[in-house]
Image (cartoon, helix red, strand yellow):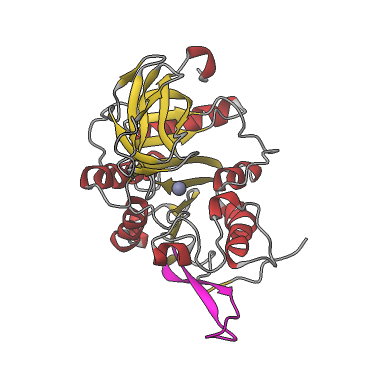
């Protein structure tokens, strides 16, 4: 098996708090022997599980990047039991550019797992996470948002678990995170996962893992950032890793299954007539696509093939055929959720 060419300035076996960079070799015009810095922080003290928290898997998703760097500054080794490994900007070139994908290699990190030890920088980062960090982890959390094009309320995403113990652990993480919604996948999640995502990497390594969507629209929402930071501390506390934290009463989480995404089929300007959380009936008109460049052309209607409510909405007005404009979810079916 090919081994990584990435070296870490941080030793993951060292106790205490250590910050540095993963050095991703990258020979470029301006730097023949250079490397790309991917920030990493390890905080270790006493006995306890290892939790990997990463954000900036997509570079234009910001709440998680801020929350993880805040955690890195706020927590000291004596606060922690176990080992916390933080990657605030996993695909650092994408985060630096404020783009979903890396400007270095056009890599969409969350579509590149299990990566390639000798591949492009994004592929090398995926491979490092899959083959070096995940084998260290008992738990992992991958923080996303709707990015530039979409907006989500605070939403946990998780599998069902494929053993009673794993299902229980995932349920406990969901309750600890205490986000507005929990999108429970109805399939996948085993050791044989072929998913190209960080969740797939975690599942292949037997790591109990969740991901979360927080906000989006290419900005930062204070209320959702607060929910992110509160949720991370609550999860740390629930794992016994942050013993002195005192969680406030939970708000409660609405458990949902997604019904599907709705796409623009015409180029133009998208006018939504529904907001996040609004109920949706089958065939209901959810919005219009306008054509101001052809003013006498009537707008097209966007109809819903699904019943449920709006979980996610497009943030940008301009659309072309194939752009997702809504994602519709419905309350989780009891037979599709582990008891
Ligand atoms: Zn993302």
Q: Is residue 21 above or below residue 89?
A: below
Measuring from the top left, give residue 51's x and y in whole percent: 48, 50
Residue 209 in magenta? no
Position of 175 compared to 10: left or right?
Answer: left
User: Which residue is nearer to you in this view: 247 or 52?
Assistant: 52
The answer to which image quadrant residue 332 occupies is: top left
The N terminus sits in image quarter: bottom right
Q: Is residue 296 above or below residue 78?
A: above
Residue 39 in magenta? yes
Give the residue displayed 68% in from the left and 60% down from the top.
116
Give the mark count.
Answer: 0
Res. 22 visible in picture: yes
Give the residue displayed 52% in from the left and 74% down from the top.
36
User: Which residue is nearer to you in this view: 117 or 330?
Assistant: 330
Q: Is residue 258 above or below residue 143?
A: above
Measuring from the top left, give residue 215's x and y in whole percent: 32, 43
Res. 235 visible in picture: no
Measuring from the top left, give residue 276's x and y in whole percent: 30, 30
User: Which residue is nearer to you in this view: 24 or 74?
Assistant: 24
Q: Which region of the structure is painted magenta? A: 18-41
């Amino acid at each position: 098996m090919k081994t990584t060419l990435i070296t870490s300035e941080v030793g993951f076996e060292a106790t205490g708090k250590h910050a540095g960079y993963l050095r991703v070799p990258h020979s470029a015009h301006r730097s023949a022997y250079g490397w790309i810095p991917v920030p990493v922080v390890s905080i270790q003290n006493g006995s306890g599980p290892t939790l990997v928290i990463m954000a900036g898997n997509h570079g234009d998703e910001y709440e998680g990047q801020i929350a993880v760097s805040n955690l890195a500054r706020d927590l000291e080794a004596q606060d922690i039991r176990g080992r916390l490994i933080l990657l605030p900007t996993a695909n650092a070139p994408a985060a630096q550019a404020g783009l979903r994908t890396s400007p270095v290699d056009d890599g969409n990190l969350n579509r590149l797992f299990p990566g390639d030890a000798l591949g492009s920088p994004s592929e090398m980062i995926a491979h490092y996470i899959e083959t070096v960090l995940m084998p260290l982890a008992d738990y992992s959390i991958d923080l996303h948002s709707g990015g530039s094009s979409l907006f989500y309320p605070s939403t946990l995403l998780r599998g069902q678990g494929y053993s009673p113990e794993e299902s229980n652990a995932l349920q406990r993480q969901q309750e600890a995170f205490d986000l507005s919604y929990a999108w429970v996948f109805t399939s996948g999640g085993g050791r044989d996962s072929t998913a190209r995502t960080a969740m797939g990497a975690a599942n292949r390594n037997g790591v109990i893992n969740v991901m979360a969507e927080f906000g989006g629209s290419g900005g930062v929402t204070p209320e959702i950032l607060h929910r992110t930071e509160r949720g991370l501390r609550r999860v740390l506390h629930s794992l016994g890793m942050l013993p002195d934290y005192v969680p406030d009463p939970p708000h409660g989480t609405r458990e949902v299954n997604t019904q599907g995404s709705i796409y623009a089929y015409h180029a133009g300007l998208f006018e939504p007539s529904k907001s996040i959380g609004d109920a949706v009936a089958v065939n209901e008109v959810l919005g219009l696509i306008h054509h101001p460049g052809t003013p006498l052309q009537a707008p097209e209607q966007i109809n819903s093939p699904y019943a449920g409510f709006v979980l996610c909405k497009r943030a940008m007005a301009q659309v072309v055929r194939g752009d997702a404009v809504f994602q519709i979810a419905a309350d989780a079916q009891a037979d599709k959720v582990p008891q």
